[in-house]
Each structure stands twice: as structure tokens, then as C-alpha cells.
Amino acid sequence: MAADLRPEVIEAALRGRFGRPLRSFESVGSTNDVALDWAAAGAPEGAVVVADHQTSGRGRRGRRWLDPDQAGSRFDGTAQQTGSLLMFSLILRPSGGLAGLSLLTTAAGLACAEAVEGLTGLDVKLKWPNDVMLDGRKLAGILVESRAGADAVDVAVLGCGVNVDWPEDAMPDELAGRAVSLSARSSRVPTRPELLAAVLVSFEHLYPRIADRSGAEELIRAAEARSAILGEVVAVGFPDGSSVRALARRLMPNGALELDCDGVARVVEAADIEQIR
Ligand code: BTN
């Protein structure tokens, strides 16, 4: 177990209600899966799962979320750690049910951006729907998942992965040039417990706003103010494989993105956005 992820070290850094109870692992498949199982077994809102490594970390739309250990073992046959990521999942039991899942992603992105900015002074942006960006590259990703069944209580798990210290020359080809880590941009790299505590405290303040209309509007305005794409022409890839170039116009009250496609407004709930440079 990495010394910085020992439960007592993390617990000493926590400043709010979220983060307790805590489970910290050397390695898991996906912290989201561990958290979903724990939630099904009754874990309360605020419980957090942290891992130093994930063997099957995932991103949006079934994509892989790589960590340095995996990348190392894939690329040179060794399992040497070449960097560090903060990877955690927070269990939530939203009082309003799961209707606002995309707003949870919005709030989590904001919390992550505020935390990094507060600790490092870096200018952090959001790329709809779930990317936290630094200098046009991905610093962190958010994956909110739920497992609500007919007789299940509504539970959501908010997974977050942040590239804390992963040198670009150690990143696999698929990430090099697209991802960035804090250590590449800041001489003041927070410890993982410090960063986790800051994200959780920031999220704790934003989370209640999802429950009412004016709070949700505030979240949306804050996310718009931090957007890396609004006002720009972007390449939009849809789940059916089609794509368009369109102006990213604004965020809708439910967290969806409104595009301007040659003068015609189109609201999208799910898509991949690429910035055009
Ligand atoms: C994305 O960029 O599409 C989302 C990435 C989310 C990665 C985090 S790491 C902790 C948690 N566990 C996972 O398997 N995924 C999320």
C-alpha cells in the first residue's frame, strides 16, 4: 500500500463529511465497481473508495481508463510504477433520485477544477461532458454511474481520476499529447490525500445545489464560465458514429449541450467533443 494512501493518512487530511467511511486499496478492478458493490451492501452517502491502481479502470462509453502501472506493464513488459494518479469513487444517495445524473457530472467537474485551482493556482477548464482540462489537455475525468433496480434504493457512484504525477514521456501513445498531469504544470504538486480532501469538500458544497432549480442554474452558469469549448466550433462525434462540426453554444438546465449546427439549434445529451486547433 502506498504510504500516502494509507487510510489514516487520508482520514487526517479530510475536512468535511464526505470521505467517511473510507476504503483504500493497493489495487482493484475499478473503484466504481467496488463502490457500487459497497453501496448495494448498505454503505452510506459519503463513503469513498480509493485505489493506487486499477486493473480495469473505465471511462465514459466503455472506454479504458489507464493508470501508469497498466500502461507500464502493457508497453515494456514490466509492472513498474512510473507515475501516480488519484483515483476514487464517492457513494451518493441523491434525495431527488437519479434524474440529475448529468448534473452530478457537472458538479464533480467543477469540484475537481476548483480543488486543483485552489491548491496550485492553475487555470482549469471543463470540456463537456466530463473532462477537466489544463492547457487544452485532459487532466482528469469523471464517471458517474448508477445501478438502480426495481427494488433498489437510488444510488450513484461518482468516480474521478486525476493525473497527479505521470510524466508525459512515460505515458502510452494514446495519451501522449492529449493528457497532462499536475506535476508537468505546477511546482506545487498536492499530495493525493490533500487533493482528494479538496475535491470532496468542494463537491460537498456544490452537491446540494442539484436538488433545486436555482441551485442547478448556478451550477450550470459556473460550468459555462469554466468551459473550454463554449463559443468555439468543435467536432462532435455522436454515439451512432456520425459526426458534425458545430458551434458549442450553451449548457442546458439539465447539463446537456446546445449546439448551433449551421443556424439550427441541436441539444445533445451524449457525444464526444474534440476541440479544433
Ligand atoms: C472519463 O474520462 O471518461 C472518465 C474517467 C473516470 C476514471 C475514474 S478513476 C476512478 C473511477 N473508477 C473507474 O473505473 N473510473 C473512474
Image (cartoon, rainbow, N blue to C red):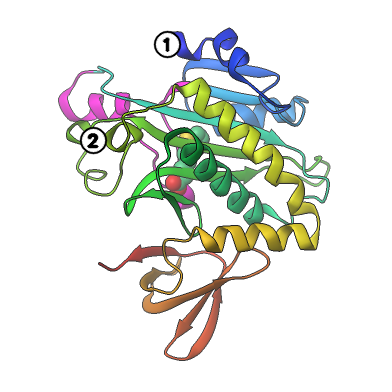
* Residue occupied by mark 1: 2
Specify few, some or many for label 1: CA neighbours under 10 Å numbering under 14, 14-19, or 20 or more: few
Q: Quadrant of the C terminus?
A: bottom left
* Residue occupied by mark 2: 171
Q: Amino acid at mark 2?
A: Met
Give the alpha-carbon distance from disc 2 to disc 1, as whole Å: 21 Å
- Quadrant assignment, res 81: top left
Q: Amino acid at mark 1?
A: Ala
Specify few, some or many for label 2: CA neighbours under 10 Å numbering under 14, 14-19, or 20 or more: many
Q: Quadrant of the N terminus?
A: top left
Above or below, 15 against 219 in this view is above
Is residue 58 magenta-colored? yes
Give the number of the disc on residue 84: none
Q: Secondary structure at mark 2?
A: loop
Q: Is residue 90 left or right of residue 159?
A: right
Q: Name the one closer to the observer, 254 or 155.
A: 254
Q: Is residue 116 visible?
A: yes
Q: Residue at x 57, y 67 (%)?
A: 269
Q: Residue at x 52, y 23 (%)?
A: 194
Magenta range = 51-78
Image coordinates of residue 274 in percent, x first then y, are 34, 64
